[in-house]
Amino acid sequence: MSHEDCVNNTAYYKEQLRIYTKVAFTCVMDYTSLTGNFETEDFTMKIAVTYDNGNIFQHFGKTETFKVYEVEDNKVVSSEVIGSNGEGHGALAGLLAGQNVDVLICGGIGGGAQTALAEAGVELCSGAQGDADQAVEAYLKGELTSKGATCDHHHHEEECGCGCGHHHHHDEEHEHHHDHPHGNPHYFSSPARAAVMVKNIAEGLASLAPGEAAVLRATGSELEGRLNKLGEEVAKLGKSGSGVDFILQHDALSWFFHDAGLSVMGVLQEEADEPPSAAALGALVEKMKAGKKRCIVVTEPQFPERVARSLARDAGAGLISLDPLASGPANPPAGYYEKVMAANVAALTKVLRDGAK
């Protein structure tokens, strides 16, 4: 079809729009379900809600029941209510992971519980209120936004119970403000999840250009294989990292550390554009000193190292720089992602073997 024909052919443009919409839908649907089962190509997931008499229970650490929803093709197909067995927030995260839950919708939740959920591979959407069923429908429509850790209640010398793991005085407020819609979106820091993205993109492009489908799928399959091998190297890191707690500069590397099976004690800078307060730094130093494991602070090239270096010095911790690829060259060369992630694996392998500087 000539350029002139295209200009005057409304049907042509409608068809192209339909194809591009389908491609975008294919990629985005699987992008948002990457926390689920990598082996299935169907859009299936499980959503759990802290539950009390039809509504969202507001204290994650004290919830007695969860309502678990089975979702297929972005529609709820079944649900059931399960008990929490009176477990604490760390065990609750394990309970949800054991139920193969992909997403948790809840009210108040603290930073410690967020970390436990991230380590269990459960996506978080917190700060929700009202009817549980309606909240799930809103999430599936992309209308529900996570408020981050929302433990902001007043306590007198007692544990909060929202899962933050801290003790508070009467007039002390405990807040976190990391606003990522639908939980942590930095899937790209995980080579295993990047492999799934590649597969979906290749399929989308193949549908757009059927004449080149075989080449596109073959090329995608080759890259997918390399990324999966890189993901296997990431997974090996946990074997030598059981005696180390990491503090991340930002949460862009959370999925990488989750896949590696490495312990994340905390996040230094929860908001990319807001440096941590002196009080937050002091609390983190005390937490690091009180821990029984060796601590390593992870810096990222996207942030100045000054605060991280100060934290490491005050806590007697090690320091390592890793790149989550949250930014980089506008036109990176072929293989740039693999090169950077392989360098991250090599740096962590060395620091776990030899100790941090």
Image: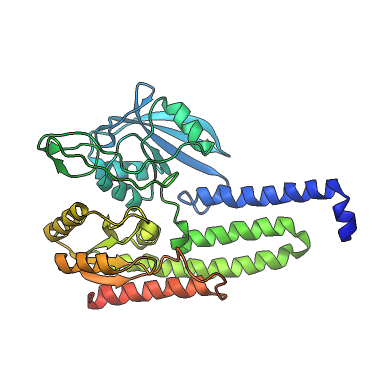
Q: Residue furthest left?
A: 157
Q: Is residue 241 visible?
A: no
Q: What colouring method underlies this structural image?
A: rainbow
Q: How many marks?
A: 0
**In the depicted view, which residue is nearer to us: 170 or 208?**
170
Image coordinates of residue 70 in percent, x first then y, are 48, 35
Q: Is residue 207 left or right of residue 37?
A: right
Image coordinates of residue 341 in percent, x first then y, are 43, 70
Classify 309 as above or below 274: below
Q: Is residue 324 left or right of residue 92?
A: right
Q: Is residue 231 visible?
A: yes
Splitting the image into 4 quarters, where does residue 57 fall? top left
**In the depicted view, which residue is nearer to us: 325 or 50?**
325
Splitting the image into 4 quarters, where does residue 352 fall? bottom left
Identify the image quadrant of the C terminus.
bottom left
Classify 23 as above or below 108: below
Identify the image quadrant of the N terminus.
bottom right
Which residue sits at x=29%, y=49%? 116
Image coordinates of residue 13 in percent, x first then y, are 80, 49
Which residue sits at x=17%, y=53%? 283
Which residue sits at x=15%, y=64%? 315
Image coordinates of residue 173 in percent, x first then y, are 20, 39
Q: Is residue 241 left or right of residue 123?
A: left
**In the depicted view, which residue is nearer to us: 58 or 175?**
175
**In the depicted view, which residue is nearer to us: 299 or 336?**
299
Which residue sits at x=52%, y=39%? 142
